[in-house]
Amino acid sequence: MSVRLVVVVLAAATLAAASVARSSSAGPRVLTVPLLERNGSGQSGTVKLTVVPKKGKVAAHFVVRLNVSPAAGKYGVAMFAHIHNVSCAQFGAMTDKSKQLATIAIGLNGLAGGRSTTTLYLPLARYANGTSSINVHASDDTYTVVACGDIPKVTP
């Protein structure tokens, strides 16, 4: 395998980890974040953050679409999701539940059948800063994290 091909393969793998699609017009911009399995849940998925441009009097905002598979993991069907102001690794290293709760930046709609959609009337840049993550939590007594994805930094 040539060095050029290896570089191309590595670049493609890096882009697959978190991709940003921009349209040539002023249309939506989509940021795809992979959700990786946590705590032996067997669940993983993707989050699509879609920027909706300003139209008339409505400010630009973004839509969060979560998909987790399988929909029913070992912790049950009901799941909650949040955007946290720390990375997945930082959240995972915390053992104090009150400190974990303090990292919640915003709650997202709960997942039903492994899916959820939330519209946030906030700028995506607030969370696409390289230090935020999206956690999907089981509805068990300890709100076990079943999947997590770091939101990469996106320059406007």
Image (tube, grey):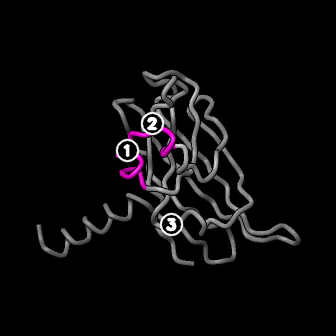
CA distance separating discs 3 and 2? 25 Å
Q: Is residue 94 magenta-colored?
A: yes
Residue bearing the label numbered 1:
92
Under circle 3, the secondary element is: strand
Q: Is residue 26 left or right of residue 154?
A: right
Q: Is residue 3 left or right of residue 62?
A: left
Q: Residue at image x 54%, y 43%? A: 101
Q: Mark 1 or 2, which is nearer the eye?
A: 1
Q: Local crowd at mark 2 within 10 Å, few (<14), some, or many (≥20)?
A: many
Local packing at callout 1 (Cα closer than 10 Å; few below 14, some 14-19, many 20+) is: some
- Mark 1 vs 3, N-terminal side: 3
The residue that label 3 is drawn on is 20
Task: Give the answer, above or below, for where 108 lies relative to 155.
Answer: above
**Region in magenta:** 87-100
Q: Quadrant of the N terminus?
A: bottom left
User: Callout 2, which amino acid?
Assistant: Val
- Give the residue at mark 2: 145
